[in-house]
Image (tube, rainbow, N blue to C red):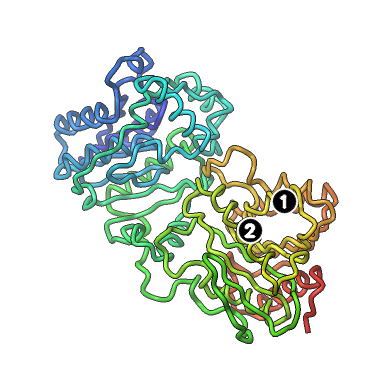
Amino acid sequence: MTAFILVAGAHTGGWVWREVAAGLRDAGARAYEVTLSGMDGGGGAERPGVDLETHIEELVRLIDRVEERDVVLVGHCYGIHPVRGAADRRSERISRIVNVDVGIPEDGDPALKLVPDQTDRERVLSLAQKDSAGTLSAPSVEEWQRWGSVAGLPAEALARLTEQAVPQPLPTLTQPLRLSGAVAALPTTGVLCTANGSSIAVVETMVALGDPAFQALADPGVTFFELDTGHWPMLSAPRELVDVLLRAAAGKGHRVAAVRQQPTHLRPFLMDVEERPRERTGRVDLHLPDADGPRPAVVLVHGGPVPAGARPTPRDWPAFVGYAQYAASLGAVGVTVDHRLHELTAYGRAADDIAEAIELVRADPRVDGDRVALWFLSAGGLLAADWLAAPPSWLRCVAASYPILAPLPGWGLADGRFRPVAAVRGAGRLPIVLTRVGLERPEIAVTVEEFVSAAADCGAAIEVIDVPLGHHGFETIDPTDESRDAVRRAMRSVLGHLGAGTD
């Protein structure tokens, strides 16, 4: 018999697992719904000394009492921290760890690192400075969305989540997780909730980027499942989650292949482009046309997050080099930039990098600083918001290819700054050239359609170029005549708005 130890996330207790535990028992397994100290609503959260270590020790004692040979530890949200801490100390007893819609914390990581919303992270740090042993108040009905997508959650379940939620002891969020390394050898399964922005495709993309930190996700002992729901599948899809947990315990699930062939983002650009000179200054590369006098510039902005250790960096990826060289071959200065969007919390830093790069480009004597276009790709699309909201006079066009145009669920960007869907209202008659792919991931496609609708409502000057059979990143995935035609149309449109020759 397999024993499942179910550990809930922040502000909740074992009660959230009630339906899942019942389903596991019906299937012949043993289930333990854990309510950790301070999470029962009985005032324990106010008791000094409740921290992450308290919760780890409680799980260790429970593991020691469990008689079943196969023990599967299941952690949701905050719960993965005490789960990994306890598994590290009792690795010989654990057959598998299951991460339910949450990342994998490492040694030294506080639970606060995985809190998606930056406002909540700052609030926790502020409260901890005033009273390190205090608590974080439970979310209101409207605030749960900041902790993860509530998609699929029935109204009565959301109401129950709110009514039974309790304050979270601050030390459980701020105390670093300490691991010996034993937990790293344990089989692991990730349950990815697609409505919260995670998916197997995202995992495969991160592995393909080549950062050593993500290569462990391609280990044969790591499996993945997807659930088409939000961040609380134990409440929104309990039967489906029961099935996934049973299959995970049996070693089933999707395995991400190690990258043995050339990853898609490093495949050749879909067009043969005349090679032009290229100059590098700091994080900025200029691809120069064969022309006299100052020329207009096209600044290409990559997406992400791209891990800091990924090599080559985006400005050397074939798609970006291809676009920049193509612009240069048609008489404009093509610009590629390595901005520092290394994690979702770094959009502000990336925006600063782009602004700095633009200043450098406009100051170059070979560039006509009054004729600049910005071209955003993928998740770099969110960085278009500042420029759409208040376009400067020198900005002659904004282009976007398969962009993300509103933060995806679970990204925690609650301050409203990086939301092109809203910012487009300030664009006026600024030309916008949008390349839309027909085989886009659904969660991204929704943001594109919202943007197109918002642009139409406010009378923005938007041109949409469709690639019906194109995938996200089609320039290196779909080398078809349809794709090449879309790239040509987009480039000629952008350069036309810059007044550059396109012969």
In the rendered image, which quarter contains the N terminus? top left
Disc 2: CA contacts within 10 A as few (<14), some (14-19) or many (>=20): many
The front one of 441 and 397 is 397
Q: Which residue does the image show at 14% across and 34% down from the upper left?
A: 67
Q: Is residue 399 above or below residue 14?
A: below
Q: Are marks 1 and 2 in contact (CB under 8 Å)?
A: yes
Q: Which residue does the image show at 17% across and 29% down from the upper left?
A: 61
SS for callout 1: helix
Residue 50 lies, in percent from the top left, at 29, 22
Q: Amino acid at mark 1?
A: Phe
Residue 4 lies, in percent from the top left, at 27, 37
Q: Which residue is mark 2?
A: 403
Q: Is residue 479 above or below residue 422?
A: below
Q: Amino acid at mark 2?
A: Pro
Q: Which residue does the image show at 84% across and 55% down from the upper left?
A: 429
Q: Which residue is mark 1?
A: 451
First in sequence: mark 1 or mark 2? 2
Q: Quadrant of residue 81?
A: top left
In the rendered image, which quarter contains the C terminus? bottom right
Q: Residue furthest top?
A: 43
Q: Which mark is residue 309?
A: none
Q: Quadrant of residue 252?
A: bottom left
Q: Which residue does the image show at 77% across and 66% down from the upper left?
A: 371
The front one of 467 and 28 is 467
The front one of 202 and 305 is 305
What's the CA distance linking mark 1 and mark 2? 10 Å
Residue 265 lies, in percent from the top left, at 50, 70
Q: Is residue 299 left or right of residue 314?
A: right
Residue 141 lies, in percent from the top left, at 56, 25
SS for callout 2: loop
Disc 1: CA contacts within 10 A as few (<14), some (14-19) or many (>=20): many
Q: Is residue 363 left or right of residue 32?
A: right
